[in-house]
Image: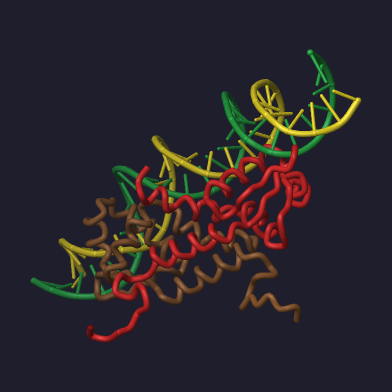
Chain colours: A brown, B red, C yellow, D green
DNA sequence: TGCTCACATCAAAAACTTTTGATGTGAGGT
DNA sequence: ACCTCACATCAAAAGTTTTTGATGTGAGCA
């Protein structure tokens, strides 16, 4: 896997409308799989597929409680994603605390 | 087009390895199409296809100079993308300047 | 132990994206 | 006016992702 494919993973997680709808639900707090499935009208295996992609990307984390799986937004995942996005789209000279001084 | 599809557009731009390689080239400064094509060993129509996606997403902007097209990173595009990413992945309660006070 | 429920995994089909090679378009030079 | 160069657009093929329905797995309860 190239570095570009590795970096692309978190953005792939964000580029499907159903996954964005899942994230919107998680913004209001932790939800278990069966609740998400019902709220978003997804099939069971469809939800499972999308949750795997979201968790693998790091922006969602999960917690088991008996038979149930609860999902929530991960703040460390968010921070990593934001940093990566900035890194990929900021000109070299401007990175870090851009100062503009000559030295 | 749903709001989710609209929001997904900027992340779609970021989730292809060739487009990430193009962004990396643009980080060191504006480049014209023919230079990018040569540096990244892409076909002419292939480059054109990817540049359209990058420009449509807002993270790259272009400038004509006679027959040549020059591409560069757009700082407003970057800022919008970062804001959108934060918005999509931050719990409702935490948004804005999170304070934690009771009122 | 055996049953059920919640979720994961699988394989095939459907939907989408990217690549390729051909052709279109418009700026600039002769 | 005509030619060439730089890039855009197109349509078909190749590749990838998503959906679907079936089956697997492991926790908890009778």
D12 is higher (above) or lower (below) than D27? above
Q: Position of residue B86 (x, y in %)?
A: 43, 67
Number of numbered discs? 0
- Residue ID at (50%, 53%): B10
Front in this rendered view, residue B68 or A33:
B68
- Residue ID at (45%, 76%): A76
Front in this rendered view, residue C26 or A95:
C26
In terms of image quadrants, where is residue A78?
A: bottom left
- Residue ID at (22%, 56%): A38
Which residue extends farthest bottom? B101
Q: Quadrant of the C terminus of chain B?
A: bottom left
- Residue ID at (60%, 62%): A89
Q: Is residue A70 left or right of residue D4?
A: left
Q: Position of residue A44 (x, y in %)?
A: 28, 54
Q: Is residue A43 left or right of residue B64?
A: left
Front in this rendered view, residue A48 or A25:
A25
Q: Quadrant of the N terminus of chain B?
A: top left
D23 is higher (above) or lower (below) than A70? above
Q: Position of residue A64 (x, y in %)?
A: 30, 74
Q: Position of residue D18 (x, y in %)?
A: 40, 48
């Amino acid at each position: 896997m190239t570095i570009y494919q590795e970096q692309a993973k978190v953005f792939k997680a964000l580029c499907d409308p159903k996954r964005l709808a899942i994230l919107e639900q998680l913004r209001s707090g932790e939800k278990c799989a069966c609740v998400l499935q019902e709220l978003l009208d997804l099939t069971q295996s469809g939800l499972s597929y999308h949750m795997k992609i979201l968790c693998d990307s790091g922006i969602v984390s999960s917690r088991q409680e008996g038979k149930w799986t609860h999902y929530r937004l991960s703040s460390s995942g968010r921070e990593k994603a934001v940093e990566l996005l900035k890194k990929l789209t900021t000109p070299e000279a401007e990175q870090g605390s851009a100062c503009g001084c000559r030295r």
